[in-house]
Image (cartoon, rainbow, N blue to C red):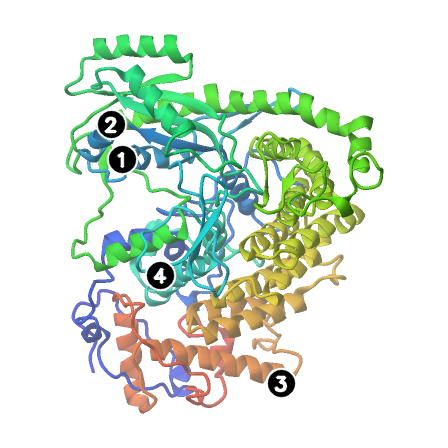
Amino acid sequence: MTPPQDATPKPPKYPADLQASMILPKQRASPASSLASLPYRRSNPSLHKLFESTTSISGSRPSSGTATPTASVVPGSVFSPGARQNGTGTPSTLPPGVSDEHRTLIQRAFVPHVSVLADAETEEMIRGKGLEGGLLQLLRPFGETVPGKVTIRDSIGASKSHEDFGIRFVNPNDGLGLPSQAGSGPTLHIDTANGQRDSARISSSSVRPRKVGGDVAQIEELVDRHLQYSEFNTHDPVPDYLNQGEPAAQSDSSSSPFYTLYLRRLLSGLPTVPHETFSHPVASIIAVSSKNPNPTEEFRRLYARQRDGDLRLPQWIDNEYLRYYVLVHEEETGDVTKSSQQFDSMKRHFGLNCHLLRLKSQQCIVSDDDAVRLPTCEWMSASEELAEIQQRETTDDITDPTPYIPDSDVTAIRTFVRELVAQSVIPHMERHVALWNDQVLARRRGISGRFMSLSKRWTPFGSSRNSSSPAMGSSNSNYDSLQGFYRPDAPEALMRKLADYCFMLRDWKLSLSTYDILRSDFQNDKAWRHYAGAAEMAALSALMSTAPLSSKTRTENIDTLIEAASYSYTDRQRSAAPYYALRTLALGLELLRLRGSSAADDAARWAARALEIGLVGAIGSALFTERVSACYAVRTGIGSLHLGSRRRKAAFWAIMAAEAWFRLEKALQAEKCLDTALRLSGTRAESKEGGAVGLPFPQMQAFIDDLRQQILGLRLQMRGYDEEGDEEEVRQSLEVEEATETLDKSPRAHRKSLIGAAPPMVVGPLSPALERGDEKGHDRFE
């Protein structure tokens, strides 16, 4: 058996003692022959671009000793750009090797939502440019990061600038619907305009991708696709090219790129629900083409559709949000003088919230001099990304289908987005925060407000709770328990909107105090989902603040809030909300982990809680097991003896994660977790004789050795080897494997599990060269 002719890299020569100590199976056939019948090619550059967020970081060779990185700036991709440097400061001095990327991720996840509505002429012009999604597809990627610094004033008038502020452009009805429960299949709960709920069981194959997130099953499926691609393209030279030959940064307490992807998709496409207002529209763009003979009347018609017509949102959403009017001018055929006159007329009718957007109508191709690739949305839902992956897998065209637009359009859109955010959206939110703070929250904080709150429960002012109607919690309550929401003009709804606005504007102090007041009101009204939402965001507000937290405050307040939120989301309601419970625990553990050694145990406990109550599937279970290990690894101990460290616990959970990945047939991830466990347990230190220091108990060493042998067997089985062979065939097969491992391999290939089926595929003790971690061997002991 000889290496394929197209193998570019020459395989390294393995040491003789390594080959003599291992009996490897025989290869069935060339991997290239098994790829001929696949419906698509793994070398598709368009498909590879979808997996850059994980392959560019996790695709290093296992024997190189590369661990999953946590750098301050992580290499980016189409769907998951790298973490940006945080300019807001960290809560405290970060533990060694711990990145602030997840705190930045949370800041960028909860942002204002702006709906987009355009007339038929504008949509037709945008589709003529090659964008089937119309104006929304053109604007959506540019809103995720506003160009330049954005200055925001908090409740006390202090200004702070942010470089990573963004907004979400959405369709008016994109986020309506509740996420389906885990294991129940995709069930849509569409809230109609009259507040009633229509439920319909659907199949995932018959429904087009929805921009609303919250489906944990789809998130798990998406991460599994990235994992499959990473497993089958481990030795692809493309990731090295993307990293520009620079090794990724490493850390003992690093986060997996797959976990970062999991967390990002968990926060993408926030559903529009009554108990929180993050996805309720803060503003709406109404766009009309300059070709329209009467743009003013068209603006009024579209506005009427949103206010009282077919685009009216459910009654629990405040309809008095900002309207921003955009006149779209076509550069090639339009008359700029006429458009300018129409724009001046618009400003006289609608005020200063207007903009003249000048775009080219002709379709742009790659070969054009000023062609710019349209950025891909970073915060898309899991269903959207899965649909995009499936589309590129099944198409015969290997070119990137992403459209291109002229550079002049990019400049015009960025100017428009910055003007929209800096001059309209943020001032609009600041005015409402000041208004609601003075008129609603100040009264609620006063003595009279507290007295009226107590009177709802204990005093005879009005009817008692026992005599109240079943539709309302009490005669003084604004909560409609039958339909499960507060009216938009109710004080509780306004205060919740105030707190959410403060959270989006990063005023953590005012948002925390408002959520605390709301918790008691929601608890009195037995509005448990509202109560859980307020407790969740109160905990996140306290942890997002840069103020230090003592252990007593964290135990009495933060832990109590997270416990109350997760319990209310899962056990206190007729219809549980596992997605929100998972979001609470995931964000809580990541923010606690940033607080250093004192909060490491709390962070690990909440990660373990997500596993205990079954909020995640198989992929999520392995990822969260890794996070428990990473949380314990943050606690390094005191002094030279590392008193109080949790390295042994971290190593134990890393071994559990390795076993979980092995059962899922993810050999690369299992080997990384096993190496992390060995590093944490201190077995990589060399003794005076030059050999590696083993584990303290022989049973532990035997278990680790057996697990590593099974992982190695899984890697070889996935590359098409049998269990039979002799040493001569082994040496040839090793060369074939090394020469062909850069070939593309399909994640669709069915693989037989090794669990309970085959004996360990490596016989005999590990050789000294293997234990020392020869750079060309399969193990990484030092």
Residue identified by numbered label 1: 134
Query: What element does badge 2 sit on?
Result: helix
Q: Is residue 109 above or below residue 673?
A: above
Label 2 crowding class (10 Å Cα cut-off): few <14, some 14-19, many 20+?
A: many
Q: Which residue, given by chain and number where applicable, does mark 3 sit on?
A: 699
- First-in-chain label (4 vs 2): 2
Q: Which of 367 and 315 lies nearest the eye of the viewer?
A: 315
| Up/down of 715 relative to 255, above or below | below
Marks 4 and 1, Cα distance to the nearest angstrom?
Answer: 27 Å
**Sequence order check: which comes first, mark 3 or mark 2?**
2
Reply above or below: 43 against 441.
below
Graded by Cα atoms within 10 Å as few (under 14), some (14 to 19) or many (20 or more), the crowding at tag 1 reads some
Mark 3 residue element: helix
Q: Secondary structure at mark 1?
A: helix
Whether residue 295 can be seen here: yes
Amino acid on which disc 3 is placed:
Gln
Q: Quadrant of the N terminus?
A: bottom left
- Rendered residue at 38%/84% (across/down): 19
Q: Tell me if 419 is positioned left or right of 568 in this view.
A: left
Mark with earlier residue (1, 3): 1
What is the three-letter code of the residue carrying label 1?
Answer: Gly
The residue type indicated by label 4 comes to Ser
Give the distance between the C-alpha atoms of the residues marked 4 and 2, in whole angstroms.
Answer: 34 Å
Q: What separation in Å lies between label 4 and label 3 (alpha carbons)?
A: 48 Å
Q: Amino acid at mark 2?
A: Thr
State the separation of the CA atoms marked 3 and 2: 71 Å
For label 2, the residue is 122
Labels 2 and 1 touching (C-beta < 8 A): yes
Q: Residues within 10 Å of mark 4 (few under 14, many from 20)?
A: few
- Residue drawn at (18%, 13%), measured in percent from left and top? 335
